[in-house]
Amino acid sequence: MPKKVPEGVIERLPTYLNCLIQLEQEGVVRVSSKRIGALTGVNPAEIRRDLVYFGTFGIKGVGYEVKYLIGKIKKILGSDEPHQIALVGAGNLGSAIANYAALGKHGFQITAIFDVDPAKTGGKLGQAIVYHVDDMAEVLRRERINMAILAVPPRAAQRVADQLVSANVNVILNYTSVMIRVPPSVRLHHSDPVNDLLYTLYYLSGRHPVTS
Amino acid sequence: MPKKVPEGVIERLPTYLNCLIQLEQEGVVRVSSKRIGALTGVNPAEIRRDLVYFGTFGIKGVGYEVKYLIGKIKKILGSDEPHQIALVGAGNLGSAIANYAALGKHGFQITAIFDVDPAKTGGKLGQAIVYHVDDMAEVLRRERINMAILAVPPRAAQRVADQLVSANVNVILNYTSVMIRVPPSVRLHHSDPVNDLLYTLYYLSGRHPVTS
DNA sequence: CTTTGTGAATATTTTCACAGCT
DNA sequence: AGCTGTGAAAATATTCACAAAG
């Protein structure tokens, strides 16, 4: 049996993948953990240890074949095969996501888009048809989609999430500003620029523990 | 001598803050670590330990005053006072960010927006004037802005980042799909839906161990 | 020489479990 | 009763340091 893989490892794999893809585009054929470390800010020993959870992909004294390692990491993550995603919300944020080329490069295809505004439905946005939200359950089932990106106004977030869950969606990326509740069986990721800003803010000025 | 605050703690504080603000809006006055834990998925003991790095904010046997704790966390993070931010890129993503109300609620104000497209410059987007990128250095200096959100096409990302750095911006939120390089003195946060998707993907299919 | 893969050591983080306060 | 704050334990994560391989 393989040892248990720490969650931190899985969090870092997409970073390595990104880095490797960029190196590949620059024509780099082989790379050392030292170089990946310099580019990603991760300790080289940690990179090697992370990779070894899944197999021995390197050559001692030489390094890693970039293309080969990309393939391996994609396989580990599951992005070696295509995945269909629904996008809910065709506003500015939704439009940005629908036209986001990097998704396609990793095998993610936005197959259906949903919005409440009748003016937006019927047409296409990026590659996908924009449906009315009322048809969501039916379309999701028909297209066998189980991943969704939520880009609706805050007030609608929880309601839409509930609808997604009851349509058997089990991965939700929440791009709204509000926290939503889903059953434990559903993987939920909340992404918010505010959180990122607040986090970095702390490290800006040497503010230290408060007393009063 | 203040104990060193783990980075994970700082990462979780915005989550608590979000949760508390939502509770406040629902009219909740007092809350226990248990309840925050249920809402955020964080172990209650960990929440208490996190908070105690900065002071004792709770009442034994009772819990935490929601408003009071919100104030304390804001102070810890530095979001008790306003911060000015520049936004580079006035496309769909930029527009979504410019109109993102949650930023304002946390004291972040987008003060200047930049774009290359002359058709977009001159007017306003949200509250802020849209300038041409050529005027970036001058405007940033004049407005004393040192934080920026990058929402430009991938090809322009590194170039714009370099310009931001030389204009003394020391916090950059990278919302492009490419990794950019900045000097170590600059805090850089890369946010990418693809990474979030890849990460969750791993835990989806039965071929991988599941963390509960 | 260079660089991987890894046992061992170190450091950090999370969780338990309970004293003490309300 | 219910809950915080915390010492101690347990669990994880990171780094060192070096044998083995090209």
Image (cartoon, coloured by chain):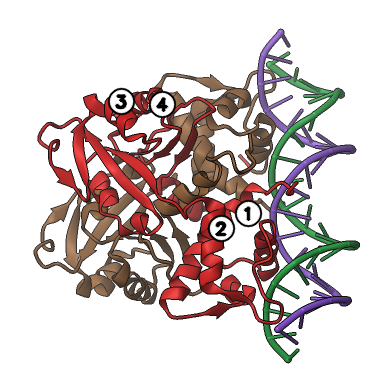
Chain colours: A red, B brown, C green, D purple
**Front of the two marks 3 and 2:** 3
**Is mark 1 in CB contact (under 8 Å) with mark 2?**
yes
Q: On screen, A79 above or below B157?
A: above
* Chain name for mark 1: A
Residue B89 located left or right of residue B72: left
Which residue was labeled with disc 3? Answer: A137
* Chain name for mark 4: A
Q: SS at mark 4? A: helix
Q: Mark 4 or mark 1: name the one nearer the start of the chain.
A: 1
Residue at horizontal 31 percent and vertical 35 percent from the top: A143
Q: CA distance from mark 4 to mark 1?
A: 28 Å
Could you say where residue A102 lies in the image, as x and y percent from the top left? 35, 59
**Is mark 3 in CB contact (under 8 Å) with mark 4?**
no
Query: Along the line of sight, which residue is nearer the eye, A144 or D10?
Result: A144
**Tag 4: amino acid:** Val
Q: SS at mark 1? A: helix
**Tag 2: amino acid:** Leu
**Tag 3: amino acid:** Ala
Could you say where residue A173 lies in the image, as x and y percent from the top left? 41, 40
Could you say where residue C12 lies in the image, as x and y percent from the top left? 72, 53
As drawn, the label of residue A13 is 2
Q: CA distance from mark 4 to mark 2?
A: 28 Å
